[in-house]
Amino acid sequence: MTGNKQRHMRWRTTLAWLLAFCFIGAVHASDNSSVSRQDAEAFFRQYQSVLAEQAADRLTALIAEDAELRIALQQADNEPDQIFTLPRRRFVQHRRTLWHFGRDVRQQFDTPRYTPQADGTLTLQVTETERHRLFGQDTGQRNEITLTLGRRDGDIVILTLHSNSRLW
Amino acid sequence: MTRNLIVASALALALVSGSQTAYADPARTVCVFSLTGVHGEPFDTLRDFALTSRQLGVPLTLRPITNERIAAEDFQAGQCDAALLTGMRARQFNPFTGSVDAIGGLQDYDGLEMLFNALARPALATHMRHGPYEVAGLLPLGAAYIFLNDRGINNVSKMAGKRLAVLEHDPAQQMMALRIGAQPVSADVSNFANRFNNGAVDVIAAPAAAYMPLEIYRGVGAHGAVVDLPVAQLSLQLVLRHERFPPGYAQQAREYFLEQFPRAMRLVHAAEDDILFFFPPPDADRYAYDQLLDEARIALTEAGHYDPLMMRLMKRVRCTRQPDRAECTDDRE
């Protein structure tokens, strides 16, 4: 192989490696900003733990401060659902005060469904049945929840929470 | 010589006794309405103020009274030189400041702080006096919220026929109840919560500060709700018989109480954070609720329950903060 050919080969090899590194770097970068199913599963386990341990501060940390938290509350007598938008602090307050006033508070979740989104977020759908004893009565609520998980400063947080809820 | 000495001694004695009188001002009695007596707020704030008042040359004797009606009556009868009362109760002594607690007046605490700042300015001092009385301080008690024993009462039309506790000394509440079709049930501060908790009424309006001490969560129960929409901004007001206090004292006191606003608000926020089933009105109904409160406030002012100048002041606060409000281009207040 002549000297020119050797230099050309070295140049092409170097370029190939550079391109390979760039590709790997890009993949790595997109992994850091997107939420994988594995990430979401770990997040959901954490979410369940936080509720089971009644840890209000940790629950707050799992929700973006500007998260859109919308509850559609089913009404009696075939009335249309009432839709409420709650700020994060009131959403957490509902859980926290229930833990304070309620007894035997427990949640049960069915198997979640995970759907990656094109923008790197991930949608998690799950049904929660929450039961407790409150002021001498056995009551509870059923929530059909859709969470949108995304990253903020590297951490996975809830960006939106929509719940179709029925209280009894 | 002896006569001169006697005269000089007498003069010296007079001078000393006179100066002692200036420093030994008799204590003024303050009837302090406090549901919890000497424990907690607002008595703690008044106790701290008493230290400042002593430095201003006016010692205070604080007399806690758990029944607000008695506190107001004792004050009116001259048994107290001053009284700490709710704004609604203080309205009889000063209609201007007593209208701070107007239904639908201000819906957020930043607006309330703006109003309190204005009321503490010397420019409004003449309005703080009404006859023999002068308001020497205001403290936020927190917004009044609607407490329901049934979350099925999920819009205004469902209030029709529901029993709503109204404070007997506030005719504006009676008028409001009739306006929304509810059945007014007369109560006072000492018994309204009990009536709600034992089911004698279905709906009450109360500040969060009453939620835990009066166990209002029992009345809400497992199936009620608390509407996260301020119906009115409640206040505590220190009312003096101004001729019993030195000139300038009331203005100094107003400035002192203004400095206590953040302290009082910390307690308000902490109390609100304790409320279970604290839901805002449904998104679709929010505007309708705002309109209802606005129309009620205007009607109650026209009926003579609220001071028109205070309503104009509040409107100025609302429109300074939210210039795009529809009312800011009309002249209804």
Image (cartoon, rainbow, N blue to C red):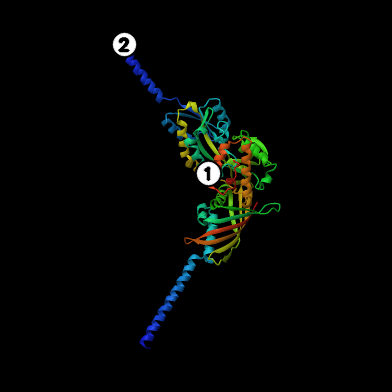
Is B315 in front, or is A166? Answer: B315
**Residue B16 as seen in the image, left or right of residue B250:** left
Q: Position of residue A106 (x, y in %)?
A: 58, 54
Q: Which residue is mark 1?
A: B111
Q: Chain of mark 1?
A: B
Give above or below for A61 relative to B190.
Answer: below
Quadrant location of the N terminus of chain B in the rendered image = top left
Q: Determine the CA span between mark 2 and mark 1.
A: 70 Å
Looking at marks 2 and 1 on the same chain, the residue that comes earlier in the sequence is marked by: 2
The residue tagged with tag 1: helix, strand or loop?
helix
* Residue B142 seen by the camera: no
* Residue A67 seen by the camera: yes
Near mark 2 (Cα within 10 A), the count class, few <14, some 14-19 or many ≥20, is few
* Three-letter amino acid code of the residue under disc 2: Arg
Near mark 1 (Cα within 10 A), the count class, few <14, some 14-19 or many ≥20, is some
Discs 2 and 1 carry the same chain letter: yes
* Extreme residue in the left direction: B1
Q: Which mark is residue B3?
A: 2
Is A90 in front, or is B93? Answer: B93
Is A76 in front, or is B17? Answer: B17
Quadrant location of the C terminus of chain B in the rendered image = top right
Q: Residue at x 55, y 64 (%)?
A: A122
Q: Which mark is residue A19?
A: none
Q: Position of residue B259 (x, y in %)?
A: 46, 39
The residue tagged with tag 2: helix, strand or loop?
helix
**In front: label 2 or label 1:** 1
Q: Are marks 2 and 1 in contact (CB under 8 Å)?
A: no
Give above or below for B56 relative to B152.
Answer: above
* Three-letter amino acid code of the residue under disc 1: Gly
**Residue B109 as seen in the image, left or right of residue A135:** left
